[in-house]
Image (cartoon, grey):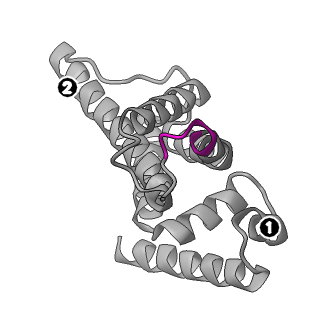
C-alpha cells in the first residue's frame, strides 16, 4: 500500500518540509512577502485539492510549479491592467528614469537566469544567497553532503555566468 499525499500526516510533513523554502523562493521572485505567502498558500491548497493525483516524490516540484505559474499569471494580469489603463509604473524617488529602467531590466534578467537553473542548483543558490545559509546548513536541510552542495553551487554560478555572457 503506497502512502498518499491525501493523508493528513503526509500532507503536513510536506508542508513543514517545503513551505518555508517555497515562500523564500516566491519572495525572491515577487519582492513582497505577503504576495509570496499568498502564492504558497494557493500552491498548498491546490496540492490538497489534487492530492490523489500527485505522487509524494513529485510534491515539491508540483508546489514550485503551481506557485510559479500563479506568479506568472499575476504578472500577466498586471501587464494587461496597466496597458488598459495606459499608466506605467512610476517610482517616487530621485533616480533617473534611465537608471530605474536599467535596474528593472537587470532584475528581470537575473530572475530569468535564476529561474532557468535546474531546480537542485536553484534551490542551493537561493538558500545560500537569499537565506544566507552556509553550505553545511544547506547540506543538513537537504540531506546531502557538503561536497554535493558545493558542486551544485559551482554549477549554478557557472550557468549564471554563461547566461550573463550571452546577454
Residue 108 among those drawn in magenta: no
Left or right: 125 in relation to 49: right
Q: Nearer the viewer, residue 49 or 128?
A: 49
> Which residue shows up at 47% across the image and 43% down it?
99
Residue 117 x %, y %: 45, 69
Q: Which picture quadrant has residue 143? A: bottom right
Name the N-terminal-most of marks 2 and 1. 2
Residue 7 among those drawn in magenta: yes
Outermost residue, left direction?
Answer: 84
Question: Answer yes or no: do the residues labelled 2 and 1 have beta carbons within 8 Å?
Answer: no
Left or right: 66 in relation to 5: left
**Residue with the mark numbered 1:** 140
Q: Which residues are magenta?
A: 5-11
Residue 141 x %, y %: 75, 62
Q: Nearer the viewer, mark 2 or mark 1?
A: 1
Which quadrant does the C terminus fall into?
Answer: bottom left
**Residue with the mark numbered 2:** 80
Residue 142 x %, y %: 69, 66
> Which residue shows up at 55% across the image and 71% down it?
121
Amino acid at each position: 500500500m503506497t502512502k498518499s499525499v491525501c493523508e493528513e500526516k503526509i500532507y503536513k510533513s510536506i508542508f513543514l518540509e517545503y513551505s518555508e523554502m517555497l515562500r523564500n523562493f516566491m519572495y525572491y521572485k515577487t519582492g513582497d512577502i505577503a504576495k509570496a505567502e499568498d502564492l504558497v498558500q494557493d500552491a498548498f491548497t491546490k496540492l490538497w485539492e489534487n492530492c490523489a493525483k500527485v505522487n509524494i516524490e513529485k510534491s515539491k516540484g508540483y508546489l514550485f510549479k503551481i506557485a510559479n505559474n500563479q506568479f506568472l499569471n499575476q504578472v500577466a494580469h498586471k501587464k494587461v491592467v496597466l496597458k488598459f489603463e495606459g499608466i506605467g509604473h512610476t517610482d517616487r524617488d530621485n533616480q533617473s528614469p534611465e537608471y530605474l529602467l536599467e535596474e528593472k531590466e537587470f532584475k528581470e534578467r537575473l530572475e530569468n537566469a535564476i529561474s532557468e537553473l535546474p531546480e537542485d542548483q536553484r534551490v542551493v543558490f537561493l538558500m545560500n544567497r537569499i537565506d544566507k545559509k552556509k553550505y553545511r546548513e544547506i547540506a543538513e536541510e537537504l540531506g546531502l553532503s557538503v561536497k554535493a552542495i558545493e558542486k551544485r553551487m559551482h554549477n549554478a554560478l557557472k550557468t549564471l555566468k554563461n547566461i550573463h555572457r550571452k546577454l
